[in-house]
Image: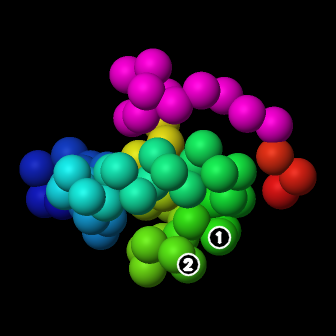
Amino acid sequence: MSNGLRYLLEKYELVWNKDDIKRFREAWNCGMTIRQMAKYMRTSETEIVLLGIDQFGLYIVKERLTKE
């Protein structure tokens, strides 16, 4: 950070393959919580949330109410 810039989210995996995105969508549509999806997909809750923001922004997944 010697140039005064801060790189955000550099520690997270932000590249997802098609199969993992499909698994995310299926888990989302089945009503899994963020925590459950992270465990199911063996990744962090933060990465699941970031993928969710991406998919929601593309209108691929719909907003839903959760108990979490």
Classify mark 1: helix, strand or loop.
helix
In the picture, the quarter occupied by the N terminus is bottom left
Q: Position of residue 61 (x, y in %)?
A: 51, 31
Report if residue 14 is visible in the image.
Answer: yes
Q: Position of residue 3 (x, y in %)?
A: 11, 50
Circle 1 residues within 10 Å: few <14, some 14–19, many ≥20: some
Circle 2 residues within 10 Å: few <14, some 14–19, many ≥20: few
Amino acid type, residue under disc 2 in the picture: Lys
Is residue 3 inside the magenta stretch? no
- Residue 48, compared with residue 65, is above or below; it is below
Quadrant position of residue 9: bottom left
Residue at 38 percent across and 22 percent down: it is: 58
Quadrant position of residue 15: bottom left
Is residue 61 inside the magenta stretch? yes
Q: Is residue 48 left or right of residue 7?
A: right
Q: Position of residue 17 (x, y in %)?
A: 19, 56
Q: Position of residue 68 (x, y in %)?
A: 83, 56
Is there CB contact under 8 Å for labels 1 and 2? yes
Residues under labels 1 and 2: Cα distance?
Answer: 5 Å
Amino acid type, residue under disc 1 in the picture: Gln
Residue at the extreme left? 3
Q: Magenta region: which residues?
A: 54-65
Residue identifier under label 1: 36
